[in-house]
Amino acid sequence: MTSSTASVALPEASVSRFPIGALLLLSLGVFVTVTAESLPAGLMPEMARDLGVDPLRIGLLVSVWAIVVIATSIPLTRATRRIDRRIVVAVSLAVFAIANVATAFAPTYEFAFATRAVAAVAHGVFWAIVIVYASSLLSGAQLGRGLALVTGGGTAATVLGLPVATALAQLTSWRVSFAVMGIGMLLLAAVVSRRLPRSVVDPVAAAQREPLRHDRSLPPLVAFGIAGLLIGLAQFLAFVYIRPYLAESAGIADGWASALLFVFGAAGMAGVAVAGALADRFPRTALTATLLVFVVAFAALALLPHATLVVVIALALWGAGTGAMFPLIQTALMRAASDRLRDLASASIVVLFNVGIAGGSWAGGQLAAAYGPTVNMAVSAVVVLVAAGVTALGAVLAGRRQRTQAFPPNPGT
C-alpha cells in the first residue's frame, strides 16, 4: 500500500552530528518571542501611565494575544506548510519584530492593541513551525535533547528575559524595551534566513493519499492534545494567582515572594536541562512521570500552605516540572505524529495550550474570589492527575502505532 504521508527532507548532517548552532538560533528565537509576549505584564504600570488607560486595559493586551493565537495558528500553518520552514520562521520573526517596533511608537492605546494583535499572529505561526523545523534537523536519537534546547529559550525568557526587559524599561522607558526587542528579532530573522538549512515537505499526490481518519497517529495526537489543554488549564489556574497564594495562604511577605519566584524559575532551567535526556532515554514514561511530580507539588501547596519549607520545596518541584514539561510533550508529539500530521499537531498543541491558559486564568479568578487561592492548587492537582492519565494513554497508543508500522499486516489476510 502506498504511504499517505509526506516525507520531510532531512539534512544528512542531522543523522551524524548534533546541529547545535541551528538549534541555538531557534532557541534564541523562542527566547525573544516569549519575552516580547510577556512584556505588557511586566511593564503594566509604565504602559498604562504613558498611554493614559487603566492598568486592566494593558492586561487585555495579554488576553487578546491568546485569542489571536487560538484563531490563527492552525489556518496559517496549513496555508504555509508547503513553504520552506526556514523562510516561514524568518518571516514570522520579521513580522513580529516590525510589530514590536510599531508598539514602541504607539501614539494611542488602540494603536498598541492593533500592533500586539499583529505580533500575536506572527507568534502563533512561529511557535507552530519552530518545533517541526527543529525536529527535521534531528535524528530520532537526538530529538529529546534537541527540542529541550529549543524550548529552553522560553524558560530562559521567564527567568532572564522579562526581568531584564523590565529593568531596562524602569531605567529608560517601556518604549525602549519594545524597540530593543524588535530590533533584536529583526537581526535574528536575517541570520535565520541566511544561515539555517532548508526544510521542505514533499507533497503527496491527491490520488495516493489515504483519508485522514486512517492515519494511525491521530489517536495518540488527540490524547496528547487533550493533555496539553489540561496542563495549560492547571498551570494558569495556579500560577496567575501565585502571589495571592503566597501572601494570603502561606503568609509570606512580598519581599520574599520575589525570591521564591526566582527559585521557581531557576528550577525550571534545571528541568529543561534534564528533559532532553529523559525524553530520549524514557520516551514513553518521562512525560507522565513529570506530570505526577506536578501533582505532588500542587497537593503539597494545597494541603500544607503554612509549612514554609514545604512551600519552597513544592515551588521548586513545580518549577522543575514546568521546565521539563514543554520539551517532553513536544517530543512526544513529534515522535507520535506521521509526517503528514506533524505541522498540524504542532499548531494544535499551541492552540489547545492557549485555550487552557485562557480558561485557567478565568476559572482561577472565580475560584480564588470564592474560596481563596489555596483551592486553586487543589483543583490544579486534580486536573494534572487527569492529564497524566491521558498522556499515559497517548504513550500506549503511540507504541501500538509504532509496532504496527514495524510489523505491517499481511495484505493477503
Image (tube, rainbow, N blue to C red):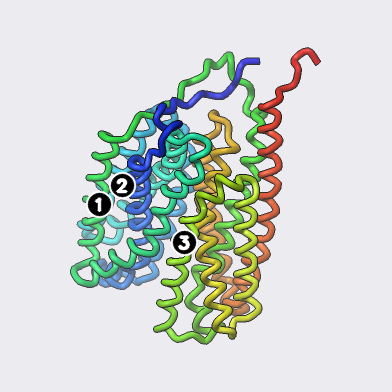
Q: Which residue is mark 1?
A: 182
Q: Secondary structure at mark 1?
A: helix
- Point out residue 311 in the picture as x, y percentages from the top left corner: 55, 78
Which quadrant would residue 109 be assigned to in this image?
Answer: bottom left
Label disc, if present, on residue 96 of the rendered structure: 2
Instruction: Kindly indicate whether the residue at mark 2 contacts the one at mark 1 (C-beta within 8 angstroms).
Output: yes
Q: Callout 1, which amino acid?
A: Gly
Residue 271 appears anywhere in the view: yes
Q: Nearer the viewer, residue 331 or 348?
A: 331
Residue at horizontal 68 percent and vertical 60 percent from the top: 385
In the drawing, does residue 222 fall left or right of residue 132? right
Residue at point 29%, 68% (across, down): 166
Residue that label 3 marks? 270
Mark 3 or mark 2: name the one nearer the start of the chain.
2
Q: Nearer the viewer, residue 306 or 373?
A: 306
Secondary element at tag 2: helix
Mark 3 or 1: the one toward you: 3
Q: 94 or 117, which lies in front?
A: 94
**Label pair 3/2, CB-CB below 8 angstroms:** no
Q: Is residue 115 above or below residue 59?
A: above
| Location of residue 39 in the rendering, given as x and y in whole percent from the top left corner | 33, 62
Q: Quadrant of the C terminus?
A: top right
Measured Cα–Cα span from mark 3 to mark 2: 29 Å
First of labels 3, 1 by sequence position = 1
Tell me the crowding category of disc 2: few under 14, some 14 to 19, or many 20 or more residues within 10 angstroms, Cα based. many
- Disc on the earlier residue, 1 or 2: 2
**123 sits left or right of 295 in the view:** left
Q: Is residue 61 visible?
A: no
User: Which residue of the protein is positioned furthest toward the front in this rendering?
Assistant: 16
Q: Residue 291 location in percent, x, y?
A: 62, 58
Residue at image point 58% right, 44% down: 332
| Residue type (three-letter) at the residue carrying disc 2 | Phe
